[in-house]
């Protein structure tokens, strides 16, 4: 008999100034003694220092490590430092949080996510994207034990990051369509609750699209909530199907092919426009929503040459082959990819 197991974060806190509660939240999580703070060079100043002082006020013994790239070496470095520590707190953007989750998982310890930006759904999800020689790979991790999302800090991050986070959430639409397709064609396991949560999350974000503006705490709250729910949908499904389909394959292909890729969620947003077209859905609505949020909707806004868009479209099906999507097993021909990108206004 197959048992279903869902692992979720234990405590999720969000709101303006909540970062100052880190120490007491960590006490509630039954953490004590030594903890490691993994942060980026910039995010250490923005969030790390507040986390440290709150932890010290609660008698934690705090050590720090600065992460530049989310590489396997960074994961190992964090693991080395984590010996005899009760947890690692990832304070920063998606990269730092991913490294913290991975290191905690591999050392059988705990992680706490303290995002300083709302750029993708890795904040609470049980997955991490880690760089090795072959590029970036998405790996399974334990979910973070706690999430502490300070909407004041997140609202002050560059707006491009938040718009990118919205693109990552909007991609739930095509991800769920791809999942349903794989369920119908290949009898792949499908979860009604995970897909419903994923879609409701995207719908709520779309309804609030007009309220997502630069520098507003309320906007940060909307996006953070959606990113956390998206991560929950991934936890419930036990895989990233509710939030990652052909549009993510397109984004991963761009990461490999384009000399200067754009942000993950920005690429996924543009991918969603095109994959929705292939699914025969309302792609124009997806494009309008992204425009309202001021997220990129075409190659020029992504800062990527049209030739790489076409190449990524023709190669997207080769990424993570076992995940069946609207791209099928053979993918798009160059002529079909060009037509698709032109028709949806992604290239001229
Ligand atoms: Zn994503």
Image: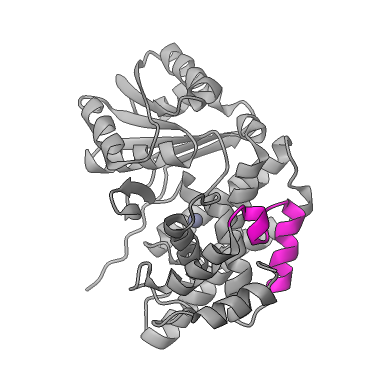
Seen from the viewer's position, the closer of residues 36 and 171 is 171
Q: Is residue 272 above or below residue 9?
A: below
Asked whether residue 34 appears in the rendered view, the answer is yes
- Count the labels in the image: 0
Which residue: 48% across, 59% down? 254
Residue nearest the viewer, comparing 125 with 260? 260
Please tell me whether residue 172 is drawn above or below residue 157 in the rendered image.
Answer: below
The image shows residue 110 at horizontal and vertical percentages of: 31, 36
Can residue 168 be seen here?
A: no
Q: Residue at x 25, y 71 (%)?
A: 2
Q: Which residue lies furthest to the right in this view?
A: 210
Is residue 278 rendered to the left or right of residue 285?
left
Q: Residue at x 68, y 77 (%)?
A: 343
Q: In which quarter of the image is the C terminus?
A: bottom right
Residue in the foreground of this view, choosing between 274 and 19: 274
The spot of residue 17 in percent (x, y) is 61, 25
Residue shown at the point (61%, 72%) measured from the top left: 274
Q: Where is residue 93 in the image (x, y as percent from the top left)?
A: 50, 37
Query: In which quarter of the view is residue 307 placed?
Result: bottom right
Report the side of 26 relative to 310 (left or right).
Answer: left
Main SS of residues in magenta: helix
Q: In which quarter of the image is residue 207?
A: bottom right
* Quadrant where the N terminus is found in the figure: bottom left
What are the residue bounds of the magenta stretch?
282-304
| Residue at the outermost bottom position | 185
Colour scheme = one colour
x then y, percent, for residue 23: 45, 22
Magenta span includes 301: yes
279 inside magenta stretch: no
**Front residue (pair 132, 48):** 132
């Amino acid at each position: 008999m197959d048992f279903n197991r869902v692992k979720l974060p234990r405590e999720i806190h969000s709101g303006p100034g909540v970062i100052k509660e880190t120490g007491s939240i960590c006490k509630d999580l039954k953490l004590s003694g030594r903890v490691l703070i993994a942060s980026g060079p910039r995010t250490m100043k923005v969030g790390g220092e507040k986390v440290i002082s709150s932890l010290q006020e609660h008698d934690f013994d705090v050590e720090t490590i600065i992460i530049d790239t989310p590489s396997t070496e960074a994961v190992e470095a964090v693991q080395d430092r984590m010996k005899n520590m009760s947890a690692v707190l990832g304070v920063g953007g998606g990269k730092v949080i991913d490294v913290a989750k991975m290191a905690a998982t591999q050392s059988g310890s705990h992680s706490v996510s303290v995002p300083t930006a709302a750029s993708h759904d890795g904040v609470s999800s049980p997955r991490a994207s880690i760089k090795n020689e072959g590029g970036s790979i998405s790996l399974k991790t334990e979910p973070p034990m706690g999430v502490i999302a300070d909407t004041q800090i997140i609202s002050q991050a560059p707006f491009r990051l938040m718009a990118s986070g919205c693109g990552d959430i909007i991609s739930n639409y095509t991800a769920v369509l791809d999942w349903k397709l794989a369920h119908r064609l290949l009898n792949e396991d499908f979860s009604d609750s995970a897909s419903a949560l994923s879609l409701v999350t995207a719908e709520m974000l779309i309804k609030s699209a007009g309220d997502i503006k630069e520098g507003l705490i309320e906007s940060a709250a909307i996006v953070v909530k959606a990113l956390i729910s998206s991560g929950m949908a991934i936890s419930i499904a036990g895989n990233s199907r509710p939030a990652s389909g052909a549009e993510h394959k397109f984004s991963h292909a761009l990461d490999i092919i384009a000399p200067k890729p754009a942000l993950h969620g920005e690429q996924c947003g543009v991918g969603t426009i095109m994959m929705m077209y292939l699914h025969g859905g309302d792609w124009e609505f997806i494009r309008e929503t992204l425009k309202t949020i001021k997220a990129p909707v075409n190659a020029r806004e992504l800062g990527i040459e049209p030739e790489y868009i076409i190449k990524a479209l023709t190669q997207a099906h080769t990424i993570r082959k076992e995940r069946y999507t609207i791209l099928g097993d053979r993918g798009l021909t160059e002529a079909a990819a060009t037509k698709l990108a032109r028709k949806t206004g992604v290239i001229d």
